[in-house]
Amino acid sequence: MSVPDWLVAVQNYMKALQYNHTGTQFFEIKKSRPLCGLMETAREMIRESLPIKCLEAVILGIYLTNGLTSLERFPISFKTQFSGHCFHHVVLGVYCNGRYGSLGMSRRQDLMDKPLTHRTLGELVAEFESSYKRYQHTLKKVKIGLYVPHDPHVFQPIEWKHLVLNAARLGAQEMRKELEKHGRDMRMKILKSSSAQSPIKERSRGKSLSPRRRQSSPQRRFTQRRDKSPASVERKPPELSTLNDGYQIRI
């Protein structure tokens, strides 16, 4: 199945779950939570098959596209104003083979998924702005995140707002220029998450951050214990694979 066909299938699956109009959010989504924890919430959404809102759709969209390594995913958040009130919305931006699109859920059909046909990020955001204008909403802010890793076990939060644009202050031309620069930098892999430099946030399940210490430390530690405790002379030190297999990160 091609990438565009897979995106259509993912969007149809989310539409089958339906938008949550009840006013009660069935799944708790904390944006600061590590990606591996959010993927567990996505699996829960699939098990429960309950209606979802826009933020839950972004997490579910990430989970269902993790296997598409040629597809890049990143969050796009909108803040709009209507009749003196502010509204917030988020979709999952996607990029593949030089084209942008989106996945998501909304009360409005034209404020969620967009086909993978837009040539630039600025063009995609402009399409959303045009959709908002149909409902007399004024776009106030746009927040663009960074590419989400495809490894579901990454202990690193999603970067939700690496670029924040004030649409009320920037003109349409300046805003498009900033968006295109951000999109170009992401494609060139220049931008990195602010938390990517922390070793513990890149830790994967069953892997050690210090291979050299992993080979020598267990042997040395158990040798010292044999010398000090006569009762432990008959014991054999555990295999290294046993130590690694038992290591897990709990969220």
Image (spheres, rainbow, N blue to C red):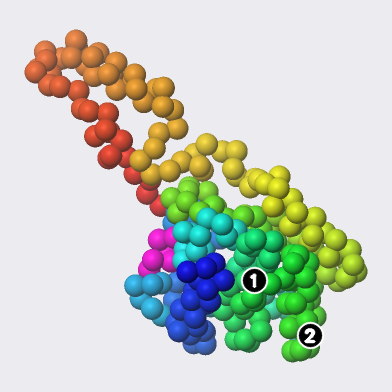
Is label 1 in a helix, a strand or a loop? strand
Q: Which quadrant holds residue 78?
A: bottom right
Apparent side of residue 146 relative to residue 69 in the rendered image (left or right): right
Q: Position of residue 185 (x, y in %)?
A: 74, 50
Q: CA distance from mark 1 to mark 2?
A: 22 Å
Q: Residue furthest top?
A: 227
| Amino acid type, label 2 | Lys
- Residues 42 and 115: in front is 115
Q: Nearer the viewer, residue 141 or 76?
A: 76
Residue name at image x 34 percent, y 22 percent: 215
In front of the other: 41 or 174: 174
Above or below, 51 against 196 in this view is below
Mark 2: few, some, or many residues within 10 Å (few <14, many ≥20)?
Answer: few
Task: Please indicate, yes or no, whether residue 55 appears anywhere in the rendered image.
Answer: no
Q: Main secondary structure of the magenta part?
A: helix
Helix, strand or loop status at disc 2:
helix
Asked whether the residues under the numbered discs 1 and 2 touch, taking CB atoms below 8 Å apart as contact, a structural biologist would say: no
Q: Earlier in the sequence, mark 1 or mark 2?
A: 1
Q: Which mark is residue 116?
A: 1
Q: How many numbered marks appear?
A: 2
Which residues, given as a range, are shown in magenta?
38-44
The residue lying at 38 percent from left, 68 percent from top is 44
Question: Where's residue 65, x and y in %?
Answer: 50, 64
Q: Nearer the viewer, mark 1 or mark 2?
A: 1
Residue under label 2 = 133
Q: Above or below — where is 27 with respect to 107?
A: above
Residue 90 within the segment the image draws in magenta: no
x, y (%) of residue 244? 31, 35
Q: What label does residue 144 carry, if any?
A: none
Q: Amino acid at mark 1?
A: Leu
